[in-house]
Amino acid sequence: MALKVEHEIHQRRKGRNVGVGLMLGAFVVLVLALTFTKITSGDFELPKANEISQ
Amino acid sequence: MSDASYTAPSKETEASLGDYFALLKPRVMSLVIFTAFVGMLAAPVSVHPVVGFASILFIAIGAGASGALNMWWDADIDMIMKRTVKRPIPAGKVQAGEALYLGAALSGMAVMMLALSANLLAAGLLAFTIFFYAVVYTMWLKRSTPQNIVIGGAAGAFPPLIGWVVATGSMSIEGWLMFALIFVWTPPHFWALALFMRSDYDDAGIPMLTVTHGRPSTRRHIFGYTVVLFALAVGTGFTSIGGPVYLVAALVLNTLFLKGAYDIWNRDEVASEVDDYAVERKFFKLSLLYLFLHFGAILAEALLRPWGLGGW
């Protein structure tokens, strides 16, 4: 028998936390995909070296 | 606090993830997603699928955030109205303050992310939409004027325009026509609801037209707005977002809608009570189908365009 019996409320909270975690993970993936799409699009230009130094 | 005095939150009062999601008004969000998607596809500029998906998602999150702010502010009247009593705050599952923080945080995140994924104009329009719904409609108009639903309807009308701006980066007559379609559709849709949800708005003290000007006046207003909507919706069929498919759909739907509004206008309360507002309920259901099929027809025209079939 487990030393600490998990209450039903804890299970619900765990489910909620897993849900938030999955959403945050999906958000990171989306930002990554968005960044990749932006920098590989035709109209994306890196600033020139002399512009950065000015 | 001793263990003896501790009472664990019950299953009924402990919020689940679904309760927080319910704060975002998922049904309204689904309409926002659909209309913003149509607005984006109807535009004459193609959008990268990733950018389009992200932009629609952020528009939907922004709309949901304004819904959470609405539920925070309106918690007192939501407890009174039958239609809203099961929402997470009046049901005691979520604290009003939590809705405020969630709404504010998601609003800021959605606007910033839309600026990054699409453009500043689209983000500015989304910020204005959230402000308009949460502050102008919810905090100001809703409890002060029978024109609440007329002016407040603008908040729900912005998504297709924002979708258009995501694609084009600018506003045009077509985007504004899609805005106008929802804007003029909103009052008859909600007034029909107010007619058969008899006591809800009275009990909550919201000055709906049914309360301030009476029910016969509301019936006249529904008919008047439906006439304007007829001209607007059919007229849109002759612009670049319209075409034969849209025009046929608009003619059929607007004729049915006008007939429904005419029937409502020609009924009195006695007749309505006898059949438990059957005509008003039917009109309300039709109004949902009306909007869905109009935007569906605009989408059909946009999808047919690459094959040379859509538009005029």
Image (cartoon, coloured by chain):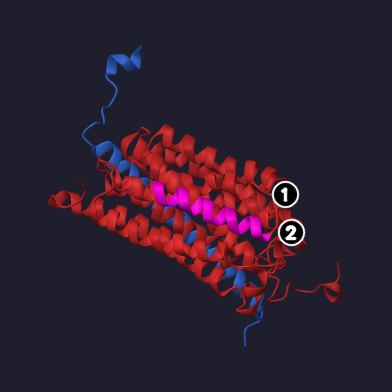
What residue range appears in magenta? B215-232
Write down the chain letter for disc 2: B
Viewer-nearest of labels 2 and 1? 1
- The chain assigned the colour blue in the figure is A
Mark 2 lies on residue: B77
Give the quarter of the figure containing the N terminus of chain B. Answer: bottom right
Q: Residues within 10 Å of mark 2 (few under 14, many from 20)?
A: some
- The answer to whether dots 2 and 1 both sit on one chain is yes
In the displayed structure image, the side of residue B59 where residue B280 appears, left or right: right
Decide which of tag 2 and tag 1 comes sooner along the chain: 2
Residue B226 is a magenta residue: yes
Identify the residue under disc 1: B143
The x, y position of residue B312, in whole percent, is: 19, 46
From the rendered image, report the letter of the chain displayed in red. B
Given residues B12 and A12, the one toward you in this image is B12
Cα gap from disc 2 to disc 1, whole angstroms: 10 Å
Q: Chain of mark 1?
A: B
Residue B10 rendering spot, x and y as whole percentages: 72, 76
| Residue B117 seen anywhere in this rendered image of the structure | no
Q: Taking B169 as reference, is B196 left or right?
A: right
Name the spot of residue B71 as percent of width and height, x first.
66, 56
